Image: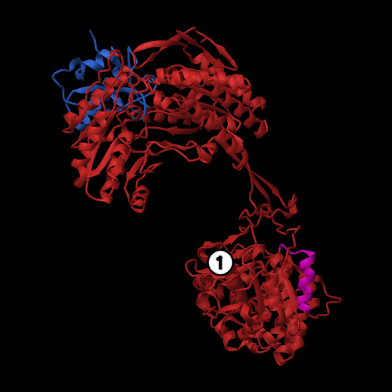
Chain colours: A blue, B red
């Protein structure tokens, strides 16, 4: 079962950010609030926890906690070069603005 | 299960693709209604309907009183649907019934309060009586007009309230609106639509399209027919909306996230503070953007506070939202619940300590619901994620601090700035802290209080713009200024002269309101004049010389008991500092009338004192401001002791501004003195030098008024008579200063010349005289006299006819002369008069250094008087040439 679909542009963007900072830690996909109301999916560099689900794609390691994965289903990560940010969508929407909003990779 | 449709163009319709969705009761986890799901085609249809309705004008063009009447009917319909709305709010959003039961009442109040306010108090149209532009006088008025098609995007936490915050001001102001309620909570917006239809609000004015923001967002935020977007929701979404809206420069108001600090001071009433902290953070399960989710507590009361807050939190009853005994209900969705749990986990990993809660709540019989226990974290550092990121659930961070300054710093250490609180028994201390925190709302000894007439909105990344109150109404209007000029005439339009060679202005407005009382013994009229002006506490302004000559005492004696004091420190060139000192004295003595006794310096200082005394502040607040006064100023009576300035009747005051390095003006018809008393006894002791110098000031006024591009027949007539009087009487008073009749004629000449130039303006001679006066302390009249003949010759080809008349007024027999020759003879006649009365003929005689002339030329060019000169002046070298001739 794939947990994550990673767009090639998004892969490149993530690798570039990690290389710039000299970071090799996994990328966590998490549930986040960005102020008032709907939760959304976010990306941040974080250590894996024992209970996480782990997926390696294109040389990158992604982690996600089980509850978030159960809620979201398969997650797609795309990249918007003009906004220099990522768009995360999922089989089951987390918040009603999924697909429109963008998020950055928190380092 | 109840079914609800979209509301577009006055009708309830299915989505064009037939899609629907179910809305879930978060207390049970079960669906309770099916709702049509709008797609992009429906969004387009709704926007088109709103646009048609706006353009048609039935709503936007409707008289405000009629719109208000329809909105009052809307409010009544809401009242009728009250119970439905309350139940829908509870079941859709999970609000406890104890809160939601007032929703319909509140919605009706909001509508009526704002509608009546708009009708009776909001300035839909305002006159601007003083525009500040002296060069383009006319009527200026400002209208508030609707913006157009508005989109209101509403979150799920307060679906009715936050929809009404957008619907009501939008409609009051004549806009049309498309409301997109949150997908979690669509019902109450659709009930509001039923109310709008029942009230008779025209089709298309109010539309509702429930549907996912992710798919509708792009359409509603970029559609060219949408003029304004009002959004309440997350900062992430708000940012994207702002970005999308920027493509067509839509107006945007955003109310976004918060991480507000509730600051408990060490002198707080502990019971109140604990209750306020819990209410501030746990109300509606913490799902409120302005919640006080960081509670800042002084170290010395921290442990006691935590113990009491923990106890209070654990007393909260968590239950199904329709159970009237519930204090807290469910969070809105399972995703919300999972995210709250995730942040609690983050907090633990960051080293914060959970003192209570931190887990799902069990509610018997409601196992499918989304309940979470009120959770308190201590040992929190403000840099932690749980202190910086909004956790939209019942989770609070308690942070220690040790001083008021530290509390403010912690409060401000956030990307958000939505609200906050201060709890203290010392209101002054609490207000000081409130002022220091950068947020849009601060509650003192309270929390979560809203009211229709006060604004709400955020600093920093908490949003843009304000909702509610007049500020909220303003956000739904455009501001249009309409100008109707005094003169609809190409030749009288002053700015038009920028692009043409002929600078002459044809039309004019003559407004010289000063009453003049002239003659021997007219000082006696002072008391009556003061009484007629409503002044019974007169402050005399004068200069040391006039005081020493005993003239101020003559005035003081005439005023009798009306005189409350004498300020006798006005210098030769009055500056801002002396005006402030005189004003301070006037304030201290509660003066209601100013009597200026002296020459132009004193009178100009008096005018500025009158403005500053009337309007408050300092003289520097009013200088270099033209045509800004819209009401009468402090009454001003002038008793001139010279015969030259004309300031007793003019609408300008000249004050030296040392910082600007030049003289600056107030120019306004409202600073013309109320009364000028020309009693020749006041000028009898004027020394010959000053008599002659001030006379040259007067004759320069008259001659420059005639040459000015603003010259007109009324002012010409006044000027010519002034010139005649000076020509005839100056030699007499120069020879015999005791000739009272000649002295009176000189005073009258100066006043008449004042009436002339205050309308027609002066020119380059004054620009040059102002400059050497400021830079080299040359008395003004003397400077005018020295440069005047040079300027007359400079202007000859642009004012030949006028100068020829001046020559005649000077007694030159111009019969048989060509016009230019006659014009040049006027300058000769002035020089002859100067020599006759012993006036200095060159700037070197009055101490101006030759190497200073270059700088003078540049400054003179920048003097505003130069712009009215008959011959256009743009080259400083031309002015330097004139200074050199006058040297």
Q: Position of residue B690 (x, y in %)?
A: 63, 85
In magenta segment, residue B380: no
Q: What range of the chain is rendered magenta? A: B709-724
Residue B818 lies, with reference to residue B55, above or below; the image says below
Instruction: Tell me if residue B463 comes above or below residue B43 in the rendering.
Output: below
Please name whichever residue, B180 or B764, is drawn nearer the observer in this view of the structure.
B180
Which quadrant would the C terminus of chain B be assigned to in this image? bottom right
Q: Residue furthest left?
A: A50
Check disc 1 and report the residue beneath it: B613
Residue B429, image x and y in percent? 33, 52
Q: Does the magenta stretch include residue B716?
A: yes
Whether residue B184 can be seen here: no
Q: Is mark 1 on a helix, strand or loop?
A: helix
Determine if residue B806 is in view: yes
Image point (38%, 14%), residue name = B24
Residue B592 percent across, percent down from the top left = 60, 70
Q: Is the magenta stretch mostly helix, strand or loop?
A: helix
Residue B673: give x, y in percent of width and height.
67, 70
């Amino acid at each position: 079962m794939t947990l994550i679909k990673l767009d090639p542009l998004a892969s490149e963007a993530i690798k570039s950010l990690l290389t710039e900072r000299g970071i090799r830690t996994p990328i966590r996909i998490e549930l986040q609030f960005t102020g008032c109301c709907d939760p959304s999916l976010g990306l941040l560099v974080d250590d894996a926890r024992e209970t996480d689900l782990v997926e390696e794609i294109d040389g990158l390691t992604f982690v996600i906690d089980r509850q978030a994965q159960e809620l979201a289903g398969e997650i797609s990560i795309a990249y918007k070069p003009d906004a220099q940010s990522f768009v995360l969508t999922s089989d089951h929407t987390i918040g009603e603005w999924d697909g429109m909003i963008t998020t950055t990779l928190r380092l | 299960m109840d079914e609800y449709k979209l509301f577009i163009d006055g009708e309830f319709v299915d989505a064009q693709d037939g899609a629907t969705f179910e809305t879930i009761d978060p207390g049970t986890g079960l669906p309770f209604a099916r709702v049509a799901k709008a797609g992009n085609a429906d969004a387009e249809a709704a926007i088109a309907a709103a646009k048609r309705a706006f353009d048609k004008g039935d709503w936007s063009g409707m008289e405000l009183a009629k719109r208000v009447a329809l909105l009052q009917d809307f409010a009544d319909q809401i009242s009728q649907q009250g119970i439905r709305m309350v139940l829908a709010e509870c079941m859709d959003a999970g609000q406890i019934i104890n809160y939601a039961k007032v929703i319909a009442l509140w919605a009706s109040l909001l509508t009526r309060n704002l509608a009546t306010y708009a009708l009776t108090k909001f300035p839909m149209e305002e006159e601007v009586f003083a525009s500040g532009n002296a060069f383009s006088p006319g009527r200026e008025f400002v209208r508030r007009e609707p913006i157009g098609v508005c989109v209101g995007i509403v979150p799920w936490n307060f679906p009715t309230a936050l929809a009404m915050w957008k619907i009501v001001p939008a409609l009051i102001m004549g806009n049309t609106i498309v409301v997109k309620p949150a997908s979690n909570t669509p019902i109450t917006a659709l009930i509001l639509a039923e109310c709008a239809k029942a009230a008779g609000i025209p089709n298309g004015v109010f539309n509702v399209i429930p549907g996912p923001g992710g798919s509708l967002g792009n359409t509603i935020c970029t559609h060219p027919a949408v003029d304004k977007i009002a959004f309440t929701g997350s900062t992430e979404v708000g940012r994207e909306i702002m970005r999308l809206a920027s493509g067509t420069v839509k107006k945007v108001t955003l109310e976004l996230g918060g991480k507000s600090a509730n600051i408990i001071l060490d002198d707080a009433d502990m019971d109140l503070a604990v209750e306020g902290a819990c209410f501030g953070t746990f109300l509606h399960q913490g799902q409120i953007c302005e919640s006080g989710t960081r509670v800042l507590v002084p170290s010395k009361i921290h442990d006691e506070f935590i113990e009491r807050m923990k106890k209070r939190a654990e007393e909260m009853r968590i239950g199904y939202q329709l159970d009237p005994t519930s204090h807290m209900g469910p969070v809105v969705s399972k995703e919300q619940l999972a995210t709250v749990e995730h942040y609690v986990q983050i907090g633990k990993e960051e080293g914060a300590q959970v003192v209570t809660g931190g887990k799902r709540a069990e509610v018997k019989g409601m196992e499918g619901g989304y309940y979470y226990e009120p959770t308190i974290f201590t040992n929190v550092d403000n840099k932690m994620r749980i202190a910086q990121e909004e956790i939209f659930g019942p989770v609070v961070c308690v942070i220690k601090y040790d001083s008021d300054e530290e509390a403010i710093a912690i409060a401000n250490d956030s990307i958000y700035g939505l609200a906050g609180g201060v709890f203290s028994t010392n209101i002054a201390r609490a207000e000081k802290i409130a002022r220091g925190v950068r947020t849009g709302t601060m509650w003192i000894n309270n929390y979560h209080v809203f009211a229709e007439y006060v604004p709400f909105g955020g600093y920093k990344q908490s949003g843009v713009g304000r909702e509610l109150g007049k500020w909220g109404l303003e956000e739904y209007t455009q501001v249009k200024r309409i100008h109707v000029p005094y003169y609809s005439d190409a030749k009288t339009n002053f700015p038009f002269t920028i692009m043409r060679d002929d600078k002459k202005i044809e039309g004019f407005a003559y407004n010289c309101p000063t009453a003049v009382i002239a003659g021997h013994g007219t000082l006696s009229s002072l008391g009556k004049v003061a009484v007629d002006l409503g002044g019974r506490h007169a402050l005399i302004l004068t200069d040391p010389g006039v005081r020493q000559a005993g003239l101020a005492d003559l005035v003081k004696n005439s005023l009798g008991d009306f005189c409350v004091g004498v300020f006798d420190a006005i210098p030769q060139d009055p500056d801002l500092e002396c005006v402030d000192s005189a004003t301070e004295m006037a304030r201290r003595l509660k003066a209601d009338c100013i009597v200026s006794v002296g020459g132009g310096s004193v009178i100009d200082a008096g005018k500025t004192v009158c403005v500053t005394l009337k309007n408050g502040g300092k003289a520097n607040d009013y200088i270099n401001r033209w045509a800004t006064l819209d009401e009468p100023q402090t009454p001003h009576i002038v008793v001139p002791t010279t015969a030259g300035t004309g300031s007793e009747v003019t609408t300008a005051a000249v004050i030296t501004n040392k910082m600007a390095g030049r003289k600056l003006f107030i120019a306004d018809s409202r600073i013309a003195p109320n009364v000028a008393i020309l009693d020749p006894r006041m000028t009898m002791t004027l020394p010959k030098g000053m008599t002659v110098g001030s006379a040259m000031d007067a004759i320069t006024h008259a001659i420059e008024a005639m040459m000015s591009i603003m010259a007109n027949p009324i002012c010409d007539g006044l000027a010519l008579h002034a010139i005649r009087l000076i020509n005839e009487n100056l030699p007499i008073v120069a020879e015999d200063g005791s000739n009272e009749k000649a002295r009176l004629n000189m005073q009258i000449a100066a006043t008449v010349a004042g009436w002339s130039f205050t309308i027609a303006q002066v020119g380059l001679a004054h620009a040059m005289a102002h400059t050497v006066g400021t830079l080299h302390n040359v008395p003004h009249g003397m400077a005018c006299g020295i440069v005047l003949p040079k300027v007359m010759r400079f202007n000859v080809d642009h004012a030949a006819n006028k100068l020829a008349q001046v020559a005649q007024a000077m007694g030159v027999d111009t019969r048989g002369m060509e016009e230019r020759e006659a014009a040049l003879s006027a300058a000769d006649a002035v020089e002859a008069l100067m020599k006759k009365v012993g006036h200095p003929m060159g700037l070197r005689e009055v101490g101006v250094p030759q190497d200073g002339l270059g700088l003078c030329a540049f400054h003179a060019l920048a003097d505003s008087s130069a712009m009215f000169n008959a011959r256009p002046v743009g080259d400083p070298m031309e002015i330097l040439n004139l200074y050199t001739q006058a040297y």
